[in-house]
Image (cartoon, rainbow, N blue to C red):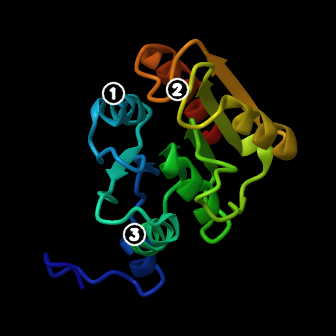
Amino acid sequence: MLRSGIALPKHIFPLFLQIKMPPLVHFLHGKESGPWGSKITYLADIVKKHGADVESLDYSATFDPLERVRILEQACAARPAAVLVGSSMGGWVATTASARIKVSGLFLLAPAFYLPDYPQHQVGCSGDKIEIVHGWHDSVVPYRNSVRFGQENNCTLHLVDDEHRLRNRLDRVGLYLSSFLERILK
């Protein structure tokens, strides 16, 4: 029965409760950055223009990438994410989490793959659902690591004239993200 006192037939009531939520895009920041830095704030505005909701949790309490995966898994159990956008360690976390939670796509920025202090990443998305942007002049995570990952997983890789934080080509990163979301969220 509705508040108005009108009784709905039993076969209609479950349909009445089904509310269509916009897709959710989770941002995963890097090891030493925060959840709402200038890069995530800029990219989150682009995500919102595509009609998606945005979440960016604060992972700064731990530098353990596997603990960050567990935090993300708990958040996605409450509300599943359609897309994970990860930067540096956040890219490693997004990729590894995708092997445990179902997502439609991964958008990765200078992901921390094949680094000696990280466990081996896992991949749960097919390569056609993964896009990477990496700077040629990255002194934190070598761009060659993304080339290797791209070759092994048959995914799209954009190499840009920038460094690890990609702040000089953020406009270009935004265009790549917008195009990616058009393809993945359709």
Spatial separation of the CA atoms under disc 1 and disc 2:
12 Å
Q: Quadrant of the C terminus?
A: top right
Give the mark nearest the N terminus, 2 or 3. Answer: 3
Q: Find disc 2 in the rendering and name its residue.
A: 178
Label 2 vs label 3, nearer the camera = 3
Question: Could you tell me the amino acid type at mark 2?
Answer: Ser
Residue at image position (58%, 19%) is 137
Element under label 2?
Answer: helix
Question: Could you tell me the amino acid type at mark 3?
Answer: Ala
Left-right relation of 6 to 144: left
85 shown above or below 94: above
Residue 183 visible in the shown view: no
Instruction: Using the image as rendered, state which of residue 117 and residue 69 is in the foreground.
Output: 117
Element under label 3?
Answer: helix
In the rendered image, residue 132, in percent from the top left (x then y), is placed at: 64, 34
Residue at image position (46%, 51%) is 23
Element under label 1?
Answer: helix
Question: Could you tell me the amino acid type at mark 1?
Answer: Tyr
161 shown above or below 32: above
Left-right relation of 103 to 120: left
Residue at image position (40%, 57%) is 21
180 shown above or below 95: above
In the rendered image, residue 41, in percent from the top left (x then y), is placed at: 30, 33
Q: Find disc 1 in the rendering and name its residue.
A: 42
Give the mark nearest the N terminus, 1 or 3. Answer: 1
